[in-house]
Amino acid sequence: MARPQGSRNVLVRVTFDTIGELAGGIRGDTARRYAQRRLYDPRDLDSLLSWVNRRRAARGLALIGLPDGDNPAVSDDTAANDTPDDPWGRFLAGFSVYVPTLGQYRSLYDR
């Protein structure tokens, strides 16, 4: 017996309203218009996350993503990155940028 038309399992559902909330509080219609202008691809999560994080970074909001255990910028032990001869270490280790080609965050302060 064939599957009835339209019966599919939904794994992730991200509406334009959700995208708007993630991007810093814009309306869903505005997020849809940005997608129509091809500023991001709403069917590609990497493209969507990159666009949302660019908007959030421009507004000074925290970036969205999962912390990486190998990245010292997002680890809980930031004191290990702070050395007496490097006063900027702890400050810069708190900032990271999303690299879509690698699919992970990189610290602005890489040693």
Image (cartoon, rainbow, N blue to C red):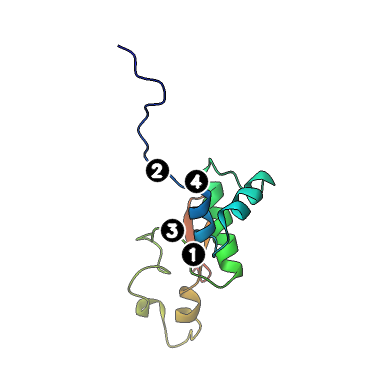
Residue lying at the far right of the rendered structure? 37
Q: Position of residue 58 (x, y in %)?
A: 61, 68
Which labelled disc corresponds to residue 47?
none
Of marks 2 and 4, which one's residue comes earlier in the chain? 2
Residue lying at the far top of the rendered structure? 1
Of marks 4 and 3, which one's residue comes earlier in the chain? 4
Q: Position of residue 83 (x, y in %)?
A: 42, 83
Q: Secondary structure at mark 4?
A: helix
**As drawn, 13 above or below 53:** above
Who is closer to the viewer here, 69 or 52?
52
Q: CA distance from mark 1 to mark 2?
A: 20 Å
Quadrant in which residue 1 is drawn: top left
Image marks 2 and 4: residues in contact by CB distance under 8 Å: yes
Q: Amino acid at mark 2?
A: Val
Tell me the residue that label 2 is attached to: 12
Tell me the residue that label 4 is attached to: 45
Q: Amino acid at mark 3?
A: Gly
